[in-house]
Image (cartoon, helix red, strand yellow):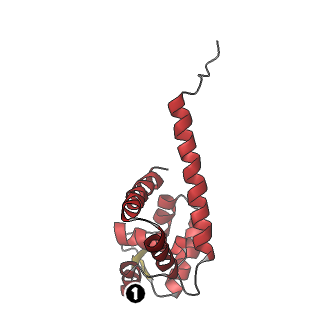
Amino acid sequence: MSDLRKPSTQDAAVRETATRLRVGIGAFKRRTQEALSEGDLTVPQLTALSRLDRFGSSTTAELARREQITPQAMGATIASLEQRDLVLRRPDSVDGRRSILSLTPAGQAAIRSGRSAVVDQVAVALAESFTSEEIATLDAAARLIQRLAELL
């Protein structure tokens, strides 16, 4: 007998949901990338700033591990944030070979303001095309998607 089991209806439904999430989030991500205005923070930049805000000071390698990307890719993102004076790099007092990253006041303001052309565009689309109940559902879904992302 084969060790392969026949997928259950529940397994198929979970896979369908996973597929819809992947397709929907991918389309949302592409559309928001297209809508970036000059000077807006990119998704990787916002993610790095958010991580530093949420978890405190960190190294580039730690941020890269959390986001499951290469240290080189995170290094490029951090360099762009340093150029904009949103992140400060200082030597680690314990291990001088490492640098500790933290938000500057401007970086904290960028996170706190929540202002960007993309966020404004999404907010307008929500306000104009969705009911209060649908917006509440999307808010709940956004929290669950964030939790899911942390589990991957």
Q: Residue at x 47, y 65 (%)?
A: 63
Residue 118: % across, % down: 52, 77
Q: Is residue 40 above or below residue 1?
A: below
Task: Using the image as rendered, state which of residue 3 and residue 72 is in the foreground.
Answer: 3
Residue 36: % across, % down: 58, 79
Looking at the image, which residue sits at the far top? 1
Residue 27: % across, % down: 61, 62
| Helix, strand or loop under label 1 | helix
Q: Residue at x 38, y 82 (%)?
A: 113
Residue 87 seen in the current view: yes
Q: Residue at x 55, y 80 (%)?
A: 79
Q: Residue at x 35, y 79 (%)?
A: 112
Residue 96 seen in the current view: no
Occupied quadrant, residue 94? bottom left
The amino acid type, in three-letter code, at marker 1 is: Ala
Task: Using the image as rendered, state which of residue 143 and residue 63 is in the foreground.
Answer: 143
Occupied quadrant, residue 145? bottom left
Occupied quadrant, residue 25? bottom right
The local crowd at label 1, few if under 14, some if 14 to 19, many if 20 or more residues have their Cα within 10 Å, is few
Can you identify the residue that label 1 sits on? Answer: 106
Q: Quadrant of the N terminus?
A: top right
Side of 59 relative to 9 (left or right): left
Task: Using the image as rendered, state which of residue 90 and residue 79 is in the foreground.
Answer: 79
Q: How many numbered discs sit on the rendered protein? A: 1
Residue 106: % across, % down: 40, 87
Task: Using the image as rendered, state which of residue 20 and residue 111 is in the foreground.
Answer: 20
